[in-house]
């Protein structure tokens, strides 16, 4: 891939991150999720903010997959086709969330947005590392979240949003699955990729720690910060299996070590 220029990056709390993707002027872009406005319950404003935030995350997912196509033209054709199909899926996700946002009275730019996944993932110089972070970490986390969110929306009588989230979940399983399949074969072909993946995970941990709110800090809406580990959705075991995480991997993930088995597979040939 082409080397990043300083103009392509930004500094956030001592970390060098990829500069934000362009957004329309109506959006106010912040550097971390801690600066987003959040409400813990399902009030009307909280519902609009949830859809608005999710809509921008899906926009970021298109951009990350598209940037992979630009940065790694030498990748195998089948993998490039998966990334291209992913862009198409993510664009439908944005469109359906934007439609629901408008239907419940929200609008583009109503809340601040953050492009955290993009700013971290697009610093990585290998396709394997980007798939490991975006698809196998962030999107796998979305499987967990989407495993429980539809019920939350149904509880407040919003079946239409619940259905949108369920259809997004079905697509996300395929994005995590192709990344799992390709990462396994990439690692089998070249074991140095394990190091690239391990460094990517370390980078993510370092950035997460740098931007994390400190104990006792209060968010922009006056809600006290909750530690990230306390906010994690329960592991969506069934859909992680559909996405071809092995039983052993899911088990390890439950103990907070999602990448061990790829490395073990590689060590065992
Ligand atoms: Fe998506
Ligand atoms: Fe996705």
Image (spheres, rainbow, N blue to C red):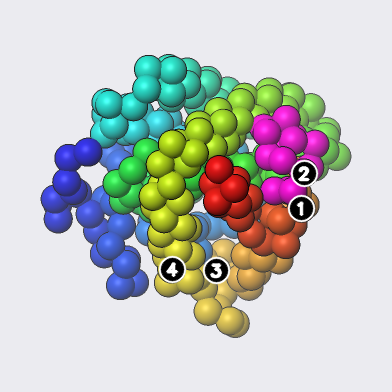
User: Measured along the vertical axis of the image, is residue 219 above or below residue 257?
Assistant: below
Q: Measure the alpha-carbon separation of dots 3 and 4.
A: 21 Å
Measured as percent of width and height from the top left, residue 132 is found at 49, 45
The answer to whether marks 1 and 3 mark residues whose Cβ atoms lie closer than 8 Å is: no
Q: Measure the alpha-carbon separation of dots 2 and 3.
A: 37 Å
Decide which of 95, 84 is in the foreground and name it.
84
Mark 1 — residue?
Answer: 251
Q: Nearer the viewer, mark 1 or mark 3?
A: 1
Q: Nearer the viewer, mark 4 or mark 2?
A: 2
Question: Which secondary structure, mark 2?
Answer: helix
Q: Nearer the viewer, mark 2 or mark 3?
A: 2
Question: Which residue is located at x 29 percent, y 46 percent?
Answer: 125
Question: Which secondary structure, mark 1?
Answer: helix
Decide which of 205, 92 is in the foreground and name it.
205
Mark 3 — residue?
Answer: 219
Pointer 2 local density, CA inside 10 Å: few below 14, some 14–19, many at least 20 = few
The numbered mark, 4 or 2, whose residue comes first in the sequence reads 4
The answer to whether marks 4 and 1 mark residues whose Cβ atoms lie closer than 8 Å is: no
Label 3 beta carbon less than 8 Å to ligand 1: no
The answer to whether marks 2 and 1 mark residues whose Cβ atoms lie closer than 8 Å is: yes
What span is colored magenta in the figure?
A: 237-250
User: Measured along the vertical axis of the image, is residue 235 above or below residue 241?
Assistant: below
The numbered mark, 1 or 3, whose residue comes first in the sequence reads 3
Question: Which secondary structure, mark 4?
Answer: helix
Q: Which mark is residue 247?
A: 2
């Amino acid at each position: 891939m082409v080397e990043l220029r300083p103009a392509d990056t930004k500094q956030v709390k001592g970390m060098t991150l990829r500069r934000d993707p362009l957004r329309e002027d109506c959006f106010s872009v912040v550097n971390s999720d801690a600066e987003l406005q959040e409400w813990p319950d399902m009030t009307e404003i909280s519902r609009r903010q949830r859809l608005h935030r999710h809509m921008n995350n899906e926009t970021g997912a298109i951009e990350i997959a598209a940037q992979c196509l630009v940065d790694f033209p030498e990748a195998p054709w089948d993998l490039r086709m998966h990334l291209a199909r992913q862009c198409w899926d993510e664009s439908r996700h944005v469109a359906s969330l934007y439609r629901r946002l408008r239907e419940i009275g929200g609008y583009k730019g109503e809340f601040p947005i953050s492009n955290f996944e993009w700013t971290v993932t697009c610093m990585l110089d290998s396709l394997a590392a980007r798939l490991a972070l975006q698809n196998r970490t962030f999107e796998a986390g979305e499987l967990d979240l989407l495993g429980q969110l539809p019920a939350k929306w149904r509880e407040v009588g919003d079946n239409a949003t619940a259905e949108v989230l369920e259809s997004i979940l079905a697509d996300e399983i395929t994005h995590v699955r192709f990344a799992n399949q390709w990462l396994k074969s990439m690692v089998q072909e070249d074991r140095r990729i394990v190091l690239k993946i391990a460094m990517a995970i370390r980078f993510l941990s370092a950035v997460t720690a740098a931007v994390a709110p400190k104990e006792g800090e209060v968010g922009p809406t006056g809600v006290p910060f909750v530690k990230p580990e306390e906010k994690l959705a329960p592991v969506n075991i069934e859909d992680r299996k559909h996405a071809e995480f092995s039983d052993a991997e899911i088990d390890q993930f439950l103990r907070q070590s999602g990448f061990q088995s790829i490395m073990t597979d590689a060590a065992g040939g």
